[in-house]
Image: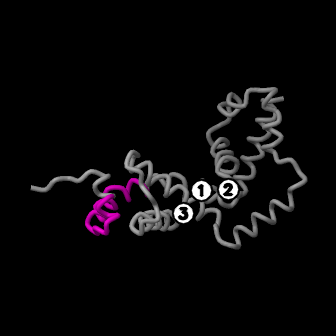
Amino acid sequence: MSTTRSDGELLRAAADGDRRAFEELYRRYAPWLTARLRGRCADPAMVDDVVQETFLAVWRGKARYREDGDVAGWLWRIGARRLIDALRGDGARGRLRQALARLRHRDEASAEERVLAGVEHGDLAGALIRLSPELRAVLQATVVDGLTTREAAVLLGIPPGTVKTRALRARKQLREALA
């Protein structure tokens, strides 16, 4: 008679080096995590790499689970952070590119700053709700997640030019709604 171990039991056993517990945890959550991440990134190879990196972090003990949390949510947070890192190209080249972009635009107020400055004169939440789902998705990727146009394009599975066009349309609609 075989008993099914809880997620917490599997995590504790895996942390102690129990390979079978780790494999069971992987079988239980890897397909779910893959499906969730594929909803955020159109590149299946990148998603597969991120899932592997997520579970490697668990196996190597680099990710610490607090006993009171939800295992699925914990794995999702690890995977989502690793996906964003992968999309940003979190290496030295990516950091250099980000630093140069900040220097190039440091004297200009960003469109987001201009919109936020207008919040006191309008209903930002209402204006965001009135945007189409496509425009909201681009704003979420570029503003909330802080991705570049290219990274947002990969995440959303659309060409970079479409990301730019939708971002411009979204900002224009927000400016009009908040004016």
Q: Name the residue under label 1.
A: 155
Q: In which quarter of the image is the N terminus?
A: bottom left
Q: Are marks 1 and 2 in contact (CB under 8 Å)?
A: yes
Label 1 vs label 2, nearer the camera: 2
The first of marks 1 and 2 along the sequence is: 2
Q: In this view, does 144 lie above or below 102?
A: above
- Dividing the picture into quadrants, the one containing residue 25 is bottom left
Q: Which colour scheme is used?
A: one colour
Would residue 108 appear left or right of 163 to someone viewing this image?
right
Would residue 78 appear left or right of 32 to someone viewing this image?
right
- Residues in magenta, as a range: 12-34
Q: How far apart are marks 1 and 3 (CA)?
A: 8 Å
What residue sits 65% from the left and 55% below the top? Answer: 152
Q: Residues within 10 Å of mark 3 (few under 14, many from 20)?
A: some
Label 2 vs label 3, nearer the camera: 2
Q: Horizontal and vertical percent for residue 167?
A: 74, 47
Would residue 97 appear left or right of 109 to someone viewing this image?
left
Name the amino acid, label 1: Leu
Can you tell which mark lies on residue 147? 2
Q: Does the magenta stretch include residue 25?
A: yes
Q: Quadrant of the C terminus?
A: top right
Q: Is residue 156 above or below residue 26?
A: above
Name the amino acid, label 3: Asp
The first of marks 1 and 3 along the sequence is: 3
